Amino acid sequence: MKPRLAEVVNLPSHVHVIALDLPGHGFTTPPLEGDDIGFEGQLKRVKQFVDLVGLSQQPFFLAGVSMGGALSGLFAARYPQLVKAVSMTCPSMKTPEDSRMISENRDIVLQNGGQLTLDNCPILPQTPEKLQYMLDITHYYSRIRYPQQILKGVLKLRKQKNDHYLKLANMIINDEHSTLLESNLHRIECPTQVLWGKEDWVVDVSGLEIIRKKAANLQHVAVLEKCGHAVNLDQPASIAKNLIHFWKEHAQLQVH
């Protein structure tokens, strides 16, 4: 939830925001052995949460980033009666052009049969140097060389969830999961917004080509300058501005 705070503070105070951490993310505990951490399992968890807190009483605005962006789109496709409008930011998906991260790490991953490991996964750094690389490739404004002690501390905090993150990363790059959003875009009935960092080196901005062709109700697209994959940290004010504009335009629309 913390990465979203930079974005949330730029929203009007009267907007009721619920920021949901999925199991294993933020300060939540990792899923139990055997739990479905794929999109299907996550969809069920979000729907369960929505029902438990009473959000299902009326349609709401849904937004997500990266894997959360793809999950938001899939939720809108699965439960059209619940979602008034959906915003997907750099959603996790297979893109026409490989991102810089994929290009730079393809060979070493292929040497392991196409499977990610703790040694070759660029988003699961195990050394301070690899953590600095991850920060550089996810943030457009990452020009800071962090002290080794801070990097080591971050690695220690992440270590307990490495196994979960690795399993999740391998799931995301699986062909079936990587194209799941694409195969459901035509089912998203509600007004749809897509935001993307122009310098996203994790999920290439060429994914917009697919969304433009296949989304059923695409209403707004914004490609943000000087913005990488960590949009909430690179351009929090711009993200909030686009969300507010889209929300004001479509908040009163009735979804049938």
Image: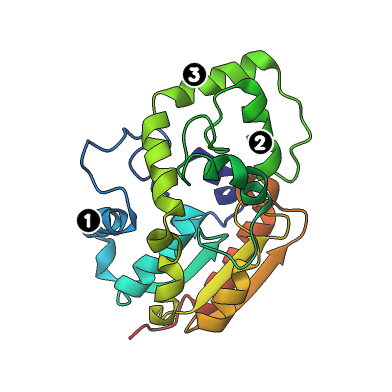
The residue that label 1 is drawn on is 48
Q: Residues within 10 Å of mark 2 (few under 14, many from 20)?
A: some
SS for tag 1? helix
Picture layout, residue 172 above or below residue 125: below
The x, y position of residue 163, in whole percent, is 37, 31
Element carrying mark 2: helix
Dividing the picture into quadrants, the one containing residue 31 is top left
> Residue at image x 67%, y 29%?
132
For the residues marked 3 and 1, what is the alpha-carbon distance in whole angstroms? 32 Å
For label 2, the residue is: 135
Report if residue 25 is visible in the image.
no
Q: Is residue 163 visible?
A: yes
For disc 3, the marked residue is 156
With 217 as the anchor, is 30 left or right in this view? left
Residue nearer the viewer, 152 or 223: 152
Q: Residue type at mark 1?
A: Gln
Residue at the image position 47 percent from the left and 75 percent from the top: 251
CB-based contact (under 8 Å), mark 3 and mark 2: no
